Image (cartoon, grey):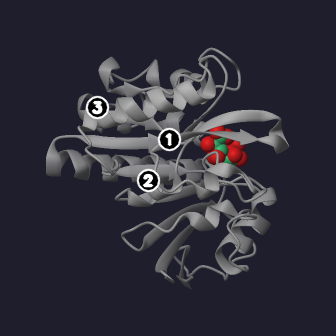
Amino acid sequence: MPKRTEVEYRVYNGADALSRAAAEHFFETAKAAVAAKGVARIAISGGSTPKRTFELLANPVERFVKAMPWQQIELYWVDERTVPPDNKDSNYRMTREALLDKVPLKPENIFRIEGELDPEEAAAKYEAAIRNHLRLEGAEGPRFDVLALGMGDDGHTASLFPHTAAINEMIRIAVANQVPQKDTWRITLTWPVINQAHDVFFLIAGKDKAQPVHDVLLGKYDPEVLPSQLIRPSNGRLLMLLDTDAAALLPAPDASGKGRLEIER
Ligand code: 6PG
């Protein structure tokens, strides 16, 4: 069944402006969620792009560290590498160093994916932790208030890599996904769960992302090749925060740096 998604993209000059925009977005969405229901459930991606945003959120000279409702925030990961939490490739380690060590999140509100375990066990434990904490029954899935994604130069997002099994997982919340192109396993939220989030945004920077960003949004629909095309939030809206390099092959944004596309697939 084709689905119509309105994509808004906002283009920023340079990494600092982009990271600041992402920090503002986290702040606004978290504040709104806490105001509405007393809690904000945030799911974050790893990789390198988000680090600067996390550092901004934790920076004592910035307004975020004082203004964010840290005590009411629950933090989840979109995906994790199959490494221990102190490994240089760990998304948790990057987040801990950039953010967790500097802000007053409650330890019980940090839902780490245990990448040090057997991948299937780690995925099952993560899914169970989410189900138990949110008291999900049957086929009910989590609805994150804000969920941040990156995009690889191969069009992957989360740990949904081209031609990997997780692309076809429609039931589970989290799975172990074998990624032959990286000779590794990853643990990832599944795309139907990602699409259930109230607010999903991509945070993408760099020249090497211009082509995948273009192809994902404007190219032939083929999620086996471009898994980011699976991201069609159930609310029908998708936000992309891009630097000028990553947005280079999109239609030029307006004077305020905003562009809009309608996608029907
Ligand atoms: C990961 C991420 C992954 C990431 C993209 C982009 O675990 O690596 O979740 O999906 O968002 O690979 O990574 P960069 O931000 O490093 O380009």
Q: Can you tell me whether the CB of the residue at mark 1 lies under 8 Å from the nearest atom of ligand 1?
A: no
Amino acid at pointer 2: Val
Which numbered disc, 2 or 3, marks the residue that appears first in the sequence? 3
Report if the CB atoms under discs 2 and 1 are less than 8 Å apart: yes
**Mark 1 — residue?**
174
Q: Residue at x 43, y 20 (%)?
A: 102
**Does residue 72 appear to the left or right of 118 in the view shown?**
left
1 is higher (above) or lower (below) than 122: below
**Residue 10 or residue 194, whichever sits in front:** 194
For label 2, the residue is 193
Mark identifier at residue 126: none
Q: Amino acid at mark 3?
A: Asn
Left or right relative to 219: residue 199? left
Q: Quadrant of ligand 1?
A: top right
**Residue 49 visible in the shown view:** no
Please tell me whether residue 238 is drawn above or below residue 154 in the rendered image. below
Q: Secondary structure at mark 3?
A: helix
Residue beneath the point at 30% across and 46% down: 30
Q: Residue at x 84, y 44 (%)?
A: 181
Residue in front for this viewpoint, 262 or 19: 262
Q: CA distance from mark 2 to mark 1?
A: 8 Å
Image coords of residue 23 (percent x, y): 45, 46
Q: Quadrant of the C terminus?
A: bottom right
* Amino acid beneath label 1: Ala
Q: Residue furthest front?
A: 138
Relative image position of residue 101 (x, y in whole percent): 46, 18
**CA neighbours of label 3 inside 10 A, class few (<14), some (14 to 19), many (20+):** few
The quadrant holding residue 253 is: bottom right
Give the image location of residue 116, x and y in percent.
61, 17
The quarter of the picture where residue 89 lies is top right
- Label 2 packing within 10 angstroms: few (<14), some (14-19), many (20+): many
Around disc 1, counting alpha carbons within 10 Å, would you say few (fewer than 14), some (14 to 19), or many (20 or more)?
A: many
